[in-house]
Amino acid sequence: MGVVTPLGHEPDVFYNNLLEGVSGISEIETFDCAQFPKRIAGEIKSFSTDGWVAPKFSKRMDKFMLYSLTAGKKALQDGGVNEDVMEELDKTKCGVLIGSAMGGMKVFNDAIEALRISYRKMNPFCVPFATTNMGSTMLAMDLVSLNLDSAMLR
């Protein structure tokens, strides 16, 4: 199993926090929400991609994609799926399924802000990076050892 949640980033920590009734809800710290009537959310805090996602991609990807990649890789490691197992798999008969309610909202918001200046400032990948299935797409690409340094991420 692999988890990235407001209650913890390791299955044992997450599960114990659930059993103890720990709340993952707190005041929003990610942005200034003073203008909004509600100022609480279930934010993911103290999250690191170290050892799971290359630093180059950590800077380019939306957080939801980083959460998907990290949790997915942790789940594979927990299940004993290592490089040797991956080499033996028929990748044409494998798939990745990740449940997510929304895609990359920051990427989408950044695109809207850029569009206010000029359409030329807009990231051409804002739509694919904002779609919900991009987290599973990036994990699948990573697992089949595609070169993520392709033109898509440049």
Image: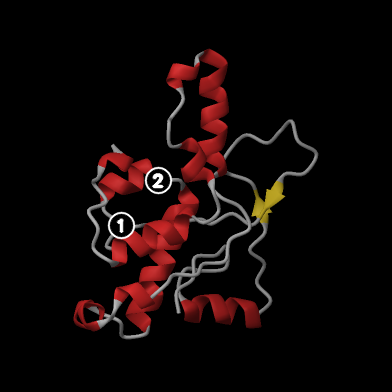
Split into 4 quadrants, where in the image is the C terminus? top left
Query: For the residues marked 1 and 2, what is the alpha-carbon distance in whole angstroms?
Result: 10 Å
Q: Secondary structure at mark 2?
A: loop
The numbered dot on residue 61 is: 2
Split into 4 quadrants, where in the image is the N terminus? bottom left
Q: Is residue 109 above or below residue 96?
A: above
Residue at left offset 48%, top offset 36%? 126
Tell me which corner region of the image, top left, top right, bottom left or bottom right, holds residue 16.
bottom right
Query: Which residue in the rendered view is the most extreme toward the right?
Result: 37
Tell me which corner region of the image, top left, top right, bottom left or bottom right, holds residue 15.
bottom right
Report whether 153 appears left or right of 123: left
> Which residue is label 1 attached to?
53
Residue at left offset 32%, top offset 78%? 77
Percent x, y of residue 139: 38, 62
Residue at left offset 64%, top offset 83%? 19
Q: The residue under label 2 is which amino acid type?
A: Met
- Specify whether residue 14 is in view: yes
Q: Could you say which is closer to the camera, residue 89 or residue 38?
A: 89
Residue at left offset 37%, top offset 73%? 74
Q: Is residue 72 above or below residue 85?
A: above
Q: Are marks 1 and 2 in contact (CB under 8 Å)?
A: yes
